[in-house]
Image (spheres, grey):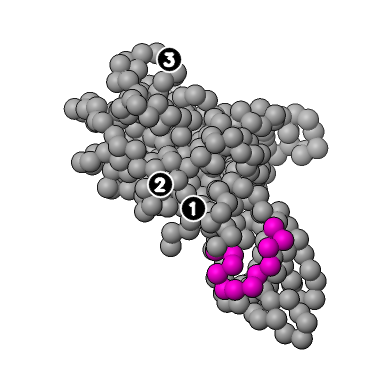
């Protein structure tokens, strides 16, 4: 009995002890569970960091590769070339359209509509309306010669300003060879466009042909293209029925009745030529043509100064070289006017002009006196000495140079 009571007490003590202290297996389970949670969280954080680092590294690498090779495809594959060309054309098209709109908005303010009847500005036909270009702040406007053919009719100019005024213009002068004329409107108040040296124009250069024949920029005309040929000689019939040559810029920016008389511009918005439907029509290529800005401005200045049709000028400066030891006398060329008659014909400083159309150079004024008997656009034969070589060239006479 006593032993039984002792065993019961021992069992009770053991049971109480088990209640106070969990089994060791249960402790290990709880410890393992906490460890797994900690390890899982650590692994998740580590994976997140690795993903971020990898993404940044990959993005940087790919960006550099894209800059080096936009497509990352074999350049020889048709697919690669097609995609690259499409992307280039798309980017260029967006740039060109945006830039063209900017240029048009700026330059159209320097273009005016010109007509012999003010009612023509309200019509839809390009017949009877022309584009004029403001060339200075004094109201001088360069226009096609055709504007002035109806000498008994007044000439009207319409601007694109808010008051929409129509002015009556005065004819300052005309050049029968180039097909250009100059008008003036007192108090016009329009600024000229920016001009560029047309001698810097290159083949394949982008250009814009622009016109504003109704004097309303919302109804203006514009074509876009590239330069096909520079300094091209166009053989045409002058307005006084002479065979002449006019030099111009050939372009696939089509010259139309709407932009004829307007401007040919580079992508900086600078004038490099004056669109001529007359020159364009004389060419069998179907391409547009513009008289170079340098030549047109030279003609305009001459007309403004003289107020008459241009006087031919050969464009050489120097002095007479007398006959020495049986050698012919001649005119020693010290300087040549840029884009003048002699310059176009290929003469250079130090050349000695011996004759013009077989007329010998016997005095320092022989050239000037003979040239006065000819007209702008006539072709003369110049014979000259270059070192020990005698050279003969045909030269088209250009108008008076104003420096």
For label 1, the residue is 311
Q: Is residue 359 magenta?
A: yes
Q: Residue furthest bottom?
A: 325
Q: Residue at x 26, y 31 (%)?
A: 168
Element at label 2: loop
Q: Secondary structure at mark 1?
A: loop
Residue 330's x, y, as percent? Answer: 67, 74
The x, y position of residue 358, in whole percent, is 72, 61
The front one of 114 and 28 is 114
Among the two numbered marks 2 and 3 on one chain, the one whose residue lies closer to the N terminus: 3
On screen, residue 188 versus residue 17, left or right, reads left
Nearer to me, 307 or 329: 329
Label 3: element kind:
loop
Mark 2 and mark 1: Cα distance apart in space: 8 Å
Q: Which residue is denoted by mark 3 in the rendering?
A: 125
Q: Which residues are magenta?
A: 357-368
Residue placed most toward the observer, 162 or 12: 162
Judge whether residue 109 can be spotted in this image: yes
Residues packed near mark 3 inside 10 Å, few (<14), some (14 to 19) or many (20 plus): few
The residue to which callout 2 is attached is 308
Could you tell me which residue is drawn at 59 percent across and 35 percent down?
241
Q: Residues within 10 Å of mark 2 (few under 14, many from 20)?
A: some
Residue at 37% over, 48% down: 307
Query: Looking at this view, is 368 or 253 the one in front?
Result: 368
Task: Report the quarter where the N terminus lies.
Answer: top left
Q: Earlier in the sequence, mark 1 or mark 3?
A: 3
Name the spot of residue 44 as percent of width and height, x first.
51, 37
Label 1 neighbour load within 10 Å: few <14, some 14-19, many 20+:
many
Q: Position of residue 382 (x, y in %)?
A: 69, 60
CB contact under 8 Å: marks 2 and 1: yes
């Amino acid at each position: 009995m006593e032993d039984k009571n002792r065993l019961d007490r021992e069992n009770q003590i053991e049971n109480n002890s088990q209640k106070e202290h969990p089994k060791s297996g249960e402790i290990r389970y709880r410890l393992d569970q906490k460890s797994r949670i900690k390890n899982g969280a650590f692994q998740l954080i580590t994976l997140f960091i690795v993903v971020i680092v990898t993404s940044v590294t990959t993005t940087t690498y790919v960006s550099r590769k894209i800059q080096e090779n936009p497509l990352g495809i074999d350049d020889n594959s048709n697919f690669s070339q097609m995609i690259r060309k499409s992307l280039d054309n798309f980017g260029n098209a967006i740039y060109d359209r945006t830039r063209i709109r900017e240029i048009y908005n700026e330059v159209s303010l320097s273009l005016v509509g010109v007509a012999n009847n003010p009612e023509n500005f309200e019509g839809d036909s390009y017949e009877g309306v022309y584009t004029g270009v403001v060339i200075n702040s004094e109201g001088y406007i360069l226009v096609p010669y055709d504007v002035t053919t109806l000498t008994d009719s007044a000439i009207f100019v319409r601007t694109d300003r808010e008051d929409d005024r129509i002015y009556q213009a005065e004819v300052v002068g005309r050049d029968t060879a180039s097909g250009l004329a100059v008008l003036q409107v007192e108090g016009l108040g329009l600024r000229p466009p920016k001009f560029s040296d047309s001698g810097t124009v290159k083949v394949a250069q982008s250009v814009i042909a622009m016109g504003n024949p109704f004097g309303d920029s919302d109804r203006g005309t514009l074509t876009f293209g590239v330069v096909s040929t520079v300094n091209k000689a166009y053989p045409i019939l002058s307005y006084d029925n002479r065979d002449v040559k006019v030099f111009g810029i050939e372009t696939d920016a089509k010259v139309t009745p709407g932009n004829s008389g307007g401007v040919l511009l580079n992508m900086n918005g600078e004038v490099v030529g004056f669109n001529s439907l007359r020159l364009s029509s004389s060419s069998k290529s179907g391409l547009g043509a513009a008289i170079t800005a340098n030549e047109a401005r030279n003609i305009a200045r001459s007309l403004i100064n003289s107020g008459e049709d241009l006087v031919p000028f050969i464009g050489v400066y120097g002095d007479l070289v007398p006959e020495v030891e049986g050698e012919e006398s001649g005119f020693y060329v010290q300087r040549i006017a840029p884009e003048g008659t002699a310059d176009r014909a290929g003469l250079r400083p130090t050349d000695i002009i011996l004759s013009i159309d077989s007329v010998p150079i016997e005095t320092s004024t022989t050239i000037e006196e003979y040239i006065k008997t000819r007209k702008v656009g006539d072709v003369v034969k110049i014979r000259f000495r270059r070192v020990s070589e005698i050279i003969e060239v045909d030269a088209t006479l250009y108008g008076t140079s104003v420096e």
